[in-house]
Amino acid sequence: MKRRNFMRSVLMFPLLSGTFGPLLVSARSRNALGPKGTRRRRPTDPNWPTSKEWAGLASSVGGRLITVKSPLDDCLGGPGSANCDRLFSELGNPYFVGDEPGLSQTLGWVDAWSFAPSVYAVAAETARDVVSAVRFARDNNLRLVVKGGGHSYQGTSSSADSLLLWTRHMNAIEVHEAFVPEGCAAADARKAVSIEAGAMWMQVYDVVTTQHGRYVQGGGCATVGVAGLVQSGGFGSFSKAFGTAAGSLMEAHVVTADGVLRIANSSTNSDLFWSLKGGGGGSFGVVTRVTLETHDLPDLFGLVSATIEAKSDSAFRQLIATILTHYRDNLMNPHWGEQIILKTDRRLVIQMLFQGIDRDAAKATWSGFFQAIEMAPDEFSYASKPFIIDFPARHFWDPDFLSRMPGATKRDDRAGSAPGNLYWSGDADQCAQVLHGYDSVWLPASLLDEAQLTTLADSLYMAAREWEVSLHCNKGLAGAPEKAIDAARDTAMNPAVLSAFALAILGAEEPPAYPGIPGHEPHVAAARDHANAIRRAMNEIRKVVPAFASYVSESNFFEKEWQSAFWGENHRKLVAVKAKYDHDGLFFVHHGVGSESWSADGFTRLA
């Protein structure tokens, strides 16, 4: 599902100078936060901003203050109408959803949250717009929501009665041959790309890889927003080679709660910089631009896929142990990433990508495993025979190349849409999804040691009896180059990622649905059954994991020990940074740093 499914098959950024310069500071400025009450204002409150005050905000952002109306409102008022039917058809297009301030890429999570539109939105086009919106929210004690790609599973991209800071239109991309972060030595210059917060990864990959022949570490899903992914950590198919997106961050521009646009890098506001590298989006400020190091592009990328059926429970146990052994001995290295999936019907699905080797080398790597399967016809059979290909890496996100590959991608089919608005076909089912349950856990490489591998295999077997388990081998850095591991070590992510061989993900969802729309209501009873099955499956895995750790962007909404699960020993330092830059808690997200101080909806400060 979504980020656990496989490949779901420009303007330059303006220079921060001249009249814009005073917004940008390198050192920590004076504290500009005013006094706060114990409850944020709502439209029904007598001290909600007046129409004159809203007009003042509109003027300060060049008229880019809009009243938010969700397209779903038409369905609530006219279920079964042609407009409603058309909307639910369009909800399968992530570009349509992304272009609507009154929608988000996930519409809800049964028994957790449902999308609710903001009252107003600032459709920011410049960092100055972001500064104005932050200052207005701060001065008027408003609930502020930030949305770029809007892919949050936790519902952090929406809130009723709020002001939305929408960065979708901030999407400039600039490639650098030698970028030097402010305040750093010229010797620190590296090839890099600067990206505004609202850009999607498909746009970035096309510029960096297709046009410039470089690699930048981003996300696997092509329509995820850039800034949010970097702030959560950020994995792609080839993270085992190139590390995390957060580890590639060289510099960020971020508007903090005092309404000041700051530069953050290893020399300037270094504590804030560290927090933005995996400390979670929406907690420390509004990122307006990131600069990421780019890497040499391999000549080839490639794919290995197969589906194997086990003919008995004992054979499935054996198959799991065999693939884990094969992974440990042959695949836990920078060449390999993506997924090994354990299905509830005793099928093993292999969906692995490789880089830096060719098809012949990939075939040789897998020959022993596939021979073992073929030599045991009484135990195993192929539901889908092994398929191995390679292709020029420069074409992986090339719109022209992808458009000639039937079934690989879908296109934004709206009139006038950009030719490069493509998305992996397998990603369509996540667009406007409603989640039933979700959870993840990092699996330490020590579990693959000979003394523990059988126990791990048994645990995964028991889990797969309850729910499908997807092992994301690219989302654990065990086997990665030391450079990638060191870069990730200098981020706020849970250090468990450094020694994990994979991230195990369990999830369930349904197509677009929304409460109160007949014929499109979420399936609550089924959702609860699925959530319970996921809980039982995860409990089986947790039995063998010495210390539970989870990835903040792909995690359980109901996780009780989220502080330690998401950040481990780094949480204490994140709390200190939060207190320094946002001590009044302007920035709130569910299970974000400092959220313990607020009610679940982020409106009431707790004693």
Image (tube, rainbow, N blue to C red):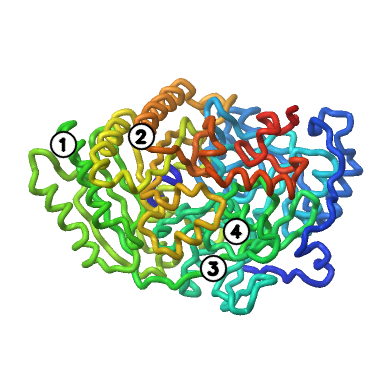
Residue 461: where, in percent of width, then height?
27, 34
Task: Compare residues 173 and 69 and report the one nearer the observer.
Answer: 173
Disc 3 element: strand
Q: Residue at x 77, y 62 (%)?
A: 27
Q: Is residue 495 visible?
A: yes
Q: Which mark is residue 541?
A: 2
First reached walking from the N terminus: tag 4 or tag 1: 4
Residue 443: where, in percent of width, then height?
38, 43
Q: Depth-wise, is mark 2 or mark 1 nearer the camera?
A: 2
**Residue 333 sits in quarter:** bottom left
Q: For the residues marked 2 and 1, what is the alpha-carbon distance in whole angstroms?
A: 20 Å
First reached walking from the N terminus: tag 3 or tag 1: 3
Q: Which mark is residue 467?
A: none
Q: For mark 4, what is the residue?
A: 199
Residue 245: where, in percent of width, then height?
52, 58
Q: Depth-wise, is mark 2 or mark 4 nearer the camera?
A: 2
Q: Depth-wise, is mark 3 or mark 4 nearer the camera?
A: 3
Task: Compare residues 238 and 401 and report the one nearer the observer.
Answer: 238
Task: Compare residues 442 and 95 and report the one nearer the observer.
Answer: 442
Q: For mark 3, what is the residue?
A: 293
| Labels 3 & 4 near each other (Cβ < 8 A) | no
Disc 2 element: helix
Q: Residue at x 53, y 42 (%)?
A: 566
Residue 12 vs residue 445: left or right? right
Q: For the residues marked 2 and 4, what is the alpha-carbon distance in whole angstroms?
A: 36 Å
